[in-house]
Amino acid sequence: MAGSLYQLDLLWAVTFATLACVLLQEVSGRLTIVSGLSLGQALQKKYGSERGTWLTFLFGGPVILGCAAYEAGNILGAISGLNLISAIDLKILTIIISLVSFIILWTDKRNAIGWLMTFLVLLMGIAFFALAMNRPFSSFQYVASSLTPSLPAGSELLTLGLVGTTIVPYNLFLGSSISKGQTVPLMRVGITISVVIGGLITAAILVAGSAVQSFSNFDELGKTLTANLGWFGGATLGIGLFAAGFSSAITSPYAASIIASTVFNWTLLRQRMVWIFVLLTGFVFGISGVKPVPVILAVQALNGLVLPLLTAYLILLINDPAIVTTYRNSRFYNVVLLGIFGSVLFMGLNNIDKSISTTLSLPGNHFSLSMTLTIVLTVYLTVRLFYYSHQKFSR
């Protein structure tokens, strides 16, 4: 939709979101490596057992619910891709996708899942890059649009959506989980490469979307690409959508189980119950054809609040000398993280505003109020950081 309505004008938002995701995952991973604690354990060490447990449920609960709410969209995304290249009944495709996802997750072979995800991302990347290369844009246009912020009229919420689909709360939990047993330099290289590749694919999807003047469904986009590029266009879109949806259909339940493990320290049985709940939720909505819009809106509001809160606590934890003794943040790094916190907070407040306004049919887009709250809370976090900095240098 971003590419269709605004061509390359919002490409800079993908650049920002990718950079912010790299930095936040790096902080999450570094916290785990240096302290030897998961995010849940670090919160309990800093704030005590009672308050720390409350915080883990505050962060982990809505994120797991978010994984479940979005799973229907993940499965339907994979089906949308297959539907462009096959004539199989949609309900049969839903059963096949859900069953294959279940088998993959039940094996719990993380190396095998990792290689499968790598293959799917590679397939998705090749497909969307192939479509993007057929668009008539110059290298200068790509670079300029990637680095020059602009907000065309009416693009505000779509821009926030682009950022929100990249910096999602469960990415921070994944950054912590996958960093165990690594060194800080190795972790930084791994996270940077993987997230940047994801950002490039997101950019390619945006560019591919610029092929149509208005976007309403994937079938319309497939027909346009087929008309412009022949069978190659429609088939490539189908493959890319399938890879994107199927990889997400595995990632959401998998991320939920990791949160159950690293945040709540639940047993393997409970972890399996969590990802089964997420997958089953997506399957039920997918097979019934009912779109859980009210549920998704409610979870969007929750996750819109959780992401800036989680970002703030990450910043405080990584700067706490009682938890992190080496690889502390520099002042410049903290300034950058405060900027990211302000951005995701503003995005979250607008997401909550959008969800409430849509549910209650109220006028939305209260940007001035969101901006005021963002400034006040960012200043408050800055004061807290100054306190930690004073502690560090007084020692």
Image (cartoon, helix red, strand yellow):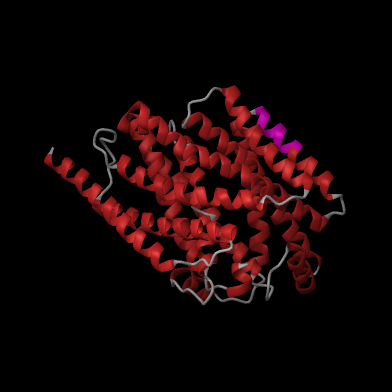
Give the dominant element type of the magenta stretch: helix, strand or loop. Answer: helix
Query: With respect to residue 165, does 130 lie above or below?
Result: below
User: Measuring 36% from the left and 34% from the top, which residue is drawn there?
Assistant: 43
Q: Name the one closer to the observer, 395 or 280.
A: 280
**For this view, does 354 lie left or right of residue 32?**
right
User: Measuring 44% from the left and 51% from the top, which residue is drawn there?
Assistant: 22
User: Measuring 33% from the left and 34% from the top, which residue is drawn there?
Assistant: 34
Task: Report whether residue 39 is seen.
Answer: no
**For this view, does 221 lie left or right of residue 316?**
right
Give the magenta-colored segment's residue range. 99-107
Residue 255 lies within the magenta run? no
Query: With respect to residue 303, does 224 lie above or below?
Result: below
**For this view, does 8 lie left or right of residue 283?**
left
Q: Quadrant of the N terminus?
A: bottom right
Give the number of callouts. 0
Name the spot of residue 284 as percent of width and height, x first: 74, 41
Name the spot of residue 36 as percent of width and height, x first: 36, 29
